[in-house]
Image: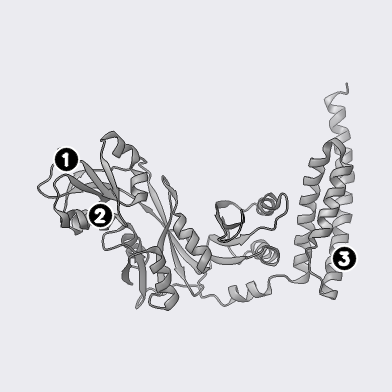
Amino acid sequence: MRDLKEIRKTIDEIDSQLIELFKKRMDCAKEVGIYKQANNIPVLNQDRENQILDDIEEKGGEYGAHSRLLYSNIMELSRALQHNIVGSGKELKGIISCAESELPSENINVAYQGIKGANGHEATLNIFPKGIAKNYKSFSDVFNAVDSGEANFGVLPVENSSAGSVSAVYDLILQHRFYIVGALDLPIDYCLAGLKQSEFSDIETVWTHPQSLSQCAQYIADHEFNSVPCSNTAVAARDVAKEKRLNVAAICSYKACEEYGLKVLDNHLQDNNSNMTRFIVISKKLYIPKDANKISLCFSLPHVTGSLYSLLCRFNSLGLNLTKIESRPIQGSKFEYLFYLDFSGNVYSENVIELLCQLSAEMPGFSFLGNYNEI
């Protein structure tokens, strides 16, 4: 058995040869890019890549799978270089160049789901304190209001730190492909709200939104309450006030409790003391602040082994931090998915815009959804 020092010396010698060969290969990839640009040939040739990878895996013997992975990454890097040469993503660059940098703050209508006192209402007032908050019954109604021009913006919940993603909103995002132009992380603190005449010992049933039921699941179980889902936490508070049943309470915000004349019977019901809900702002018009720090995309992936891994490697190679990836089934298809992805970045960074242009040229169903600040 060789000494570790001797083995490492051999590895260093091999690495020196590999890096020189890699540089030569990338020089060839650059020449290919120049040729493709001159002859208007697409960068991606999936059939050729698959043939090469199959051949590499066979030649790799016991390291066949590892060899395939190595060459997949090399091809990703080669394609990235060629995309830059041929100028992929011209349409995307044009869209971004036309974006305004500041959201209007006055004389605007902002749609939210629920009624006054709902978390969506509070988020709307936080983001647009001078805007006109307009309530709608459903998430779909909010999108339709923005689509028709009835509202300039829409404010919607997409994720809770305890209950996870709001799938219905992600489905609508992928359906409409509106721009995301802002986001807010709103602390969520629930109270148990009952009639003025009620006492805590009277309560047998709680009404609230399904997400809130999930966020307060342990509390509900500990007190053996029956639970009834409502369309919104503020709607639950309003209906408790309207129904006037001593044994029913709402799990809602303190503002909703006050708004509908209820009494706080218990405090801080959420199972997670750091309970937060992330809200986004949707718009048909693109706004990108110069200091924007989060980017959202959606796309589908080609049916090729390792395609998701290869995509994630691109972000990793540039040191970009993925903060969210969500998959949603494509309606009418068999086990095909659309992906929603958030990552930290700014489109005015050269590496970032080059990556987006590459993805726009390769990813089926690609949409740039926005670059915005999260407050």
- What is the distance, in whole Å, between disc 3 and disc 1 at their CAs? 76 Å
Q: Which amino acid does label 2 sit on?
A: Ala
SS at badge 1:
helix
Q: Where is residue 105 in the image (x, y as percent from the top left)?
A: 38, 73
Cβ–Cβ under 8 Å for marks 1 and 2: no
Residue 243 shows up from this direction: yes
Residue 374 shows up from this direction: no
Look at the image and tell me in which quarter the N terminus lies: top right
SS at badge 2:
helix
The answer to which of marks 2 and 3 sits earlier in the sequence is: 3
Q: Name the residue under label 3.
A: 31
Query: What's the mark number on residue 131?
Result: none
The answer to which of marks 3 and 1 sits earlier in the sequence is: 3
Q: Name the residue under label 1.
A: 200
Q: Mark 2 points at which residue?
A: 236
In the rendered view, would you say 132 is above or below 340? Answer: below
Q: How many labels does the image show?
A: 3
Q: Circle 3: is it few (<14), some (14-19), or many (20+) Cα within 10 Å?
A: some
Q: Which color scheme is applied?
A: one colour
Q: Position of residue 140 (x, y in %)?
A: 41, 66
- What is the distance, in whole Å, between disc 2 and disc 3 at their CAs? 65 Å
* Residue at (65% x, 64% y) in the render: 356
Cβ–Cβ under 8 Å for marks 2 and 3: no
Q: Nearer the viewer, mark 3 or mark 1?
A: 1
Q: Nearer the viewer, mark 2 or mark 3?
A: 2
Q: Which amino acid does label 3 sit on?
A: Glu
